[in-house]
Amino acid sequence: MSLRVDALYCLLVGLLIASTAPLTATTVQLSALVVVSIGGAVVLWAGVVWWLSLRPLAGSLRLVLVANALAACVLAAVSVVAASVLVLLTFVAVAIDVAAFAGSQIVALRRLARELI
């Protein structure tokens, strides 16, 4: 369940990033094409996470957990150089969301481990 919710979240965030690129590109000081590409990459990642949700669970959870932990760290680091307070708060909020998904994957891995014992 954690992976599918994560995939849906990534899909929505990716579509939001891509669709608002013309409005947000100047705020984040990137070209609209780069912002659309980032959104597209997040949508593709959503597909990978969904596909992983159909695979053996333990390995998939670990992989997405590591990716989410890295993404949360990158988002937190990027927020340090944010162009404005609004951008900073947005990056921090998304970093917290992604870290929460990593936490949910830790919980799912622990439950899976208990079921196997």
Image (tube, grey):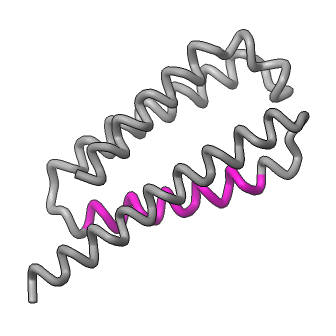
Q: Check if residue 3 falls in the magenta segment.
A: no
Tell me the quarter of the picture where residue 19 sits: top right
**Looking at the image, which residue is at 51% across and 30% down?**
13
Count the labels in the image: 0
x and y, in percent, of residue 31 in the image: 78, 19
* Quadrant showing the C terminus: bottom left
- Is 33 located above or below residue 106 in the figure? above
Q: Check if residue 75 falls in the magenta segment.
A: yes
x and y, in percent, of residue 64 in the image: 39, 58
- Is 93 located above or below residue 69 in the figure? above
- Is 73 located above or below residue 51 in the figure? below
Secondary structure character of the magenta stretch overall: helix
**Looking at the image, which residue is at 74% across and 12% down?**
23
**Looking at the image, which residue is at 68% across and 54% down?**
74
Q: Which residues are magenta?
A: 59-77
Q: Is residue 12 left or right of residue 50?
A: right
**Looking at the image, which residue is at 34% across and 68% down?**
62
- Toward the top, the furthest residue is 22
- Is 49 located above or below residue 59 in the figure? above
x and y, in percent, of residue 10 in the image: 44, 37
- Toward the bottom, the furthest residue is 117
Tell me the quarter of the picture where residue 94 sits: top right
